[in-house]
């Protein structure tokens, strides 16, 4: 089945039979179709499995019934009319056969293992499928973008043999999350924030992403990656740059991405001999959570009993510019922790007033919460009812979603952005490069030694406390 002439754009999914397509891409495309956002878009599946189109459609339907709670056979009936399938490998000869299936505009999605990203980009290029003289040709690449600075640079060179930087969309689904984008809106749409968003008023920033989950079948990837590569180098680094960047003069993809790179370039280098003062790693051991006994990481299926892969990583970063000089940014993420909890928390300096006596109020916190519920919180102080002039903490909370809102997932947002050519929420290579540069000393130091053990179901390794500057402490997982 070829794309009818009525379609102006073809979305080609390389790796269309795989897990990413089943769990994330097809549910997102199903919802976009149900809401009328895929007009003019034809879907072309491509994978090595030698299947007929009917078997591929049955495979997709099974996945949609599993991962889309609101699955409607009528909606699926309309969507499958715009789906085709072709079997083949990543050689240029086989990929060239796609040419007859394509509309004028084409978006290639590499839903492939990371070690095939460069191979696929080169195969498409040798087949001349990157030629955008008759319409756009774009390439979406999933993370990870290399495993260190050298491999990231090698991947860049391989992809750039045939693809221009402006054709490449490096996807990090955190940038499509509603609360991540709300961080930008909240910062720059409210005038009262800008005068206090600096070292004069902010004492510290904590960025946390904690999971109760373990490997969930991802052992092959995770034991090679670990928490530092899997979460901090990309997801949390994105939240860090959005929190710290300067206000852009206009809403423009290149201006925004330039400001993010500027933050990374301003990060104080971590001295090789002082890595322990700026980075902590841990690995979960046997423990329990909500009455369930949990195995340690080295007892998980397929994990070597001597593995030194970290399942928890924390960093302390300083941004040496006028706005942030001296303010520590703390980043942490881990698996098998005591709560599924994610937030960006900004602590302000305490007020100098002394008239509250020994019960003086503490500092204020501004919290952008992503899990377990999306919300915006301001922890402030108000008078305690009674005769005495005493302060007590109060929380002003605004839930992110309001009645009647139609939520979109991160992949829905980013797929639409890619179709429209909006690169604001995709990574430019120099952003990837500078994130790896920051972590190079940590990666080098962690090639030897052991991660600190922490029980599954806990808050993480005790050693993470050594990162905190005087007077600072990690916020409890689950909030205060």
Image (tube, rainbow, N blue to C red):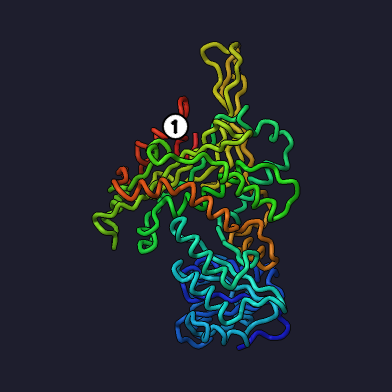
**Residue 250 in the image: above or below residue 362:** below
Query: Label 1: how many residues lie within 10 Å, few (<14), some (14-19) or many (20+)?
Result: some
User: In x, y percent, where is residue 448?
Assistant: 30, 48
On the picture, is 220 further left or further right than 373? left
**Residue 408 in the image: above or below residue 38:** above
Label count reads 1
Q: Quadrant of residue 349?
A: top right
User: In x, y percent, where is residue 265?
Assistant: 57, 45
Can the viewer see residue 394?
A: no
User: In x, y percent, where is residue 315?
Assistant: 45, 41
Q: Report the front residue among 172 and 398.
A: 172
User: In x, y percent, where is residue 260?
Assistant: 62, 48
Q: Residue at 49% x, 84% y: name it.
A: 88
**Residue 262 in the image: above or below residue 102:** above
Which residue sits furthest left? 305
Q: Report the front residue among 325 and 55.
A: 325
Q: Quadrant of residue 68?
A: bottom right
Can the viewer see residue 126?
A: yes
Query: Which residue was labeled with disc 1?
Result: 468
Q: Residue at 64% x, 82% y: name it.
A: 102
Q: Which element is circle 1 on?
A: loop
**Residue 362 in the image: above or below residue 95:** above
């Amino acid at each position: 089945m070829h794309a009818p002439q009525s379609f102006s754009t073809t979305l080609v999914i390389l790796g269309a039979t795989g897990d990413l397509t089943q769990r994330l891409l097809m549910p997102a495309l199903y919802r976009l179709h149900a809401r009328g956002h895929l007009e003019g878009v034809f879907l072309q599946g491509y994978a090595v499995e030698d299947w007929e189109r009917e078997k591929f459609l049955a495979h997709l339907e099974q996945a949609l019934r599993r991962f889309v709670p609101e699955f409607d056979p009528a909606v699926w009936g309309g969507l499958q009319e715009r789906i085709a399938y072709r079997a083949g490998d990543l050689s240029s000869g086989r990929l060239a056969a796609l040419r007859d299936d394509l509309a004028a505009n084409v978006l290639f999605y590499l839903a492939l293992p990371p070690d095939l990203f460069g191979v696929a980009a080169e195969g498409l290029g040798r087949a001349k499928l990157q030629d955008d003289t008759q319409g756009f040709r774009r390439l979406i690449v999933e993370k990870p973008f290399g495993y260190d600075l050298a491999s990231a640079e090698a991947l860049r060179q391989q992809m750039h043999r045939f693809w221009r930087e402006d054709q490449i969309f490096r996807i990090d689904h955190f940038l499509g999350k509603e609360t991540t984008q709300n961080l930008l809106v909240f910062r720059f749409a409210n005038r009262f924030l800008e005068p206090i968003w600096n070292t004069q008023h902010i004492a510290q920033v904590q960025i946390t992403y904690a999971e109760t989950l373990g490997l969930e079948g991802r052992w092959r990837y995770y034991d090679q990656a670990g928490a530092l590569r899997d979460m901090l180098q990309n997801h949390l680094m994105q939240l860090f740059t959005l929190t710290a960047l300067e206000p852009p003069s206009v809403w423009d993809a290149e201006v925004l991405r330039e400001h993010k790179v500027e933050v990374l370039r301003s990060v104080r280098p971590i001295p090789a001999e002082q890595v322990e003062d700026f980075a902590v790693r841990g690995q979960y051991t046997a423990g329990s959570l909500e009455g369930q006994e949990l195995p340690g990481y080295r007892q998980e299926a397929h994990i070597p009993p001597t593995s030194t892969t970290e399942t928890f990583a924390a960093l302390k970063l300083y941004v040496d510019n006028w706005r942030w000089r001296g303010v520590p940014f703390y980043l942490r993420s881990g698996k098998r922790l005591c709560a599924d909890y994610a937030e960006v928390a900004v602590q302000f300096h305490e007020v100098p007033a002394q008239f509250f006596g020994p019960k003086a109020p503490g500092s204020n916190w501004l919290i952008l919460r992503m899990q377990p519920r999306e919300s915006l919180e301001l922890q402030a102080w108000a008078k305690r009812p009674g005769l005495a002039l005493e302060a007590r903490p109060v929380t002003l909370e605004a839930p992110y979603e309001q009645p009647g809102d139609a939520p979109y997932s991160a992949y829905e947002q980013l797929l639409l952005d890619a179709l429209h050519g909006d690169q604001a929420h995709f990574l430019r290579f120099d952003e990837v490069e500078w994130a790896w540069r920051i972590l190079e000393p940590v990666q080098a130091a962690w090639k030897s030694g052991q991660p600190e053990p922490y029980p599954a179901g806990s808050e993480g390794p005790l050693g993470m406390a050594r990162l905190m500057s005087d007077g600072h402490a990690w916020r409890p997982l689950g909030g205060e």
